[in-house]
Image (tube, rainbow, N blue to C red):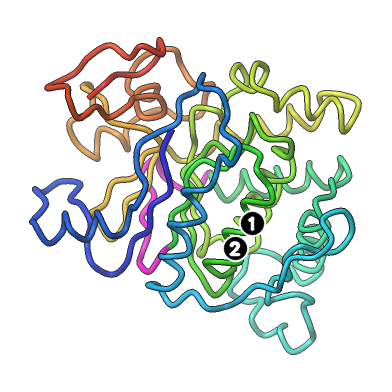
């Protein structure tokens, strides 16, 4: 639903104050592609093309050098070598800033290397990942604060190689901060690898990666648009699907960049008139069919409409 955008140190929009002309200009420069994919629109050949372009601009503006190695053989070689791998003894003093012990860090680094080769993790590693990520997300609110510089990434939709290209353009953790706006799964052939990698990076670099929920982070939607079937095909059962969709209920509903740029997955809601109203929502549930939580994940901004209208997609609003 949301397209990729990039935020630099200049505010691009105001969450609780009217934007100035300069802020609007910054927003235009920072978000070359905005607008939307819908929960029921057929997939395009490259679902993350806008993500790649915007992330490249953000990487340049935000100093996201950090670097990524050239892509290799998609079937065997690691497509992208993160700069922190492998963890060495010299890195051990840095472990104090993490919520992970040294052995856990090494294990998650191995998991990251595995997924970067577009391979699946063992089921027990998925469970460990999901349990650890839930612990982290339980400490985060519905409106998660984000500092600049940051690279903002829209719908990935299972396009693993587009995700790799985005990292090549924008840089990688821990050199670059990322905000992922949801819709990690469905439509593409590698939803499992995409959502697993994003989740792994969040656990590994919890203060560098912010992830929020999209309308496809839903049990019902994933049973229609491909993620459920992919998990069955790759694991032979629904256990991994159940583990990962269980994490979806913990994802924040929005982010707030530098206290000024409000970033939900989709649009606004007529039932929410302040950030505090968003913060007060009970998010630990399956996405409801209506109401303010549904609106944040489903609504579509519409330039030609004044006020609020009924969304033709059957969920959310047009605003």
Height in image: 109 above or below 262? below
Q: Which residues are magenta?
A: 138-150
Image coords of residue 162 (percent x, y): 62, 51
Along the horizontal axis of the image, is 256 left or right of 63? left
Answer whether residue 312 is magenta in the image: no
Determine the residue positioned at 64% across, 30% down: 186
Tell me where residue 168 sits by quadrant.
bottom right
| Tag of residue 109 | none
How many marks are shown on the rendered structure?
2
In this view, the mark in front (1 or 2): 2
Determine the residue positioned at 58% across, 74% down: 97
User: Which secondary structure class fits the magenta region best?
Assistant: loop
Image coords of residue 279 (percent x, y): 32, 38
Along the horizontal axis of the image, is 223 left or right of 170? right
- Precedes in sequence: disc 1 or disc 2: 2
Name the element at disc 2.
helix
Name the element at disc 1.
helix
Quote the CA–CA distance across marks 1 and 2: 18 Å
Given contact means CB atoms under 8 Å apart, are the residues at marks 1 and 2 in contact?
no
Image coords of residue 250 (percent x, y): 54, 36
Height in image: 86 above or below 5? below
Along the horizontal axis of the image, is 5 left or right of 52? left
Given residues 251 and 235, the one toward you in this image is 235
Answer whether residue 147 is magenta in the image: yes
Image coords of residue 188 (percent x, y): 67, 35
Determine the residue positioned at 43% across, 57% down: 54
Residue located beneath label 1 in the image: 203
| Tag of residue 167 | 2
């Amino acid at each position: 639903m949301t397209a990729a955008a990039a935020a630099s140190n200049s505010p691009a929009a105001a969450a609780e104050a009217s934007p100035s002309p300069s802020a609007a200009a910054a927003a235009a420069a920072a978000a070359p592609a905005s607008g939307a994919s819908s929960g029921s629109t057929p997939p395009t050949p490259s679902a993350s093309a806008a993500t790649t372009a915007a992330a490249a601009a953000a990487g340049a503006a935000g100093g996201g050098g950090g670097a990524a190695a050239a892509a290799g053989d998609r079937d065997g070689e690691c497509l992208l070598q993160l700069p922190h791998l492998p963890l060495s003894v010299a890195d051990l003093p840095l472990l104090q800033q993490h919520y992970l012990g040294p052995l856990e860090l090494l294990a998650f680094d191995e998991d990251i290397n595995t997924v970067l080769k577009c391979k699946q993790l063992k089921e027990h590693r998925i469970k460990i990942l999901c349990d650890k990520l839930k612990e982290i997300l339980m400490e985060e609110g519905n409106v998660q604060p984000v500092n600049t510089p940051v690279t903002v990434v829209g719908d990935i939709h299972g396009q693993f190689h587009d995700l790799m290209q985005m990292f090549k353009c924008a840089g990688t953790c821990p050199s670059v901060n990322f905000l992922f706006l949801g819709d990690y799964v469905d439509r593409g052939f590698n939803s499992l690898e995409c959502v697993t990698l994003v989740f792994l990076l969040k656990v590994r670099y919890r203060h560098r990666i912010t992830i929020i929920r999209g309308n496809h982070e839903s049990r019902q939607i994933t049973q229609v648009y491909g993620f459920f079937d992919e998990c069955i095909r790759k694991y032979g059962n629904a256990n991994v699907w159940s583990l990962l969709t269980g994490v979806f209920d913990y994802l924040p509903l929005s982010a707030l960049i530098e206290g000024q740029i409000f970033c939900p997955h989709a649009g606004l809601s007529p039932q929410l008139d302040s950030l505090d109203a968003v913060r007060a929502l009970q998010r630990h549930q399956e996405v409801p069919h209506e109401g303010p939580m549904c609106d944040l994940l489903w609504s579509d901004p519409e330039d030609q409409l004044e006020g609020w209208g009924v969304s033709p997609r059957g969920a959310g609003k047009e605003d």
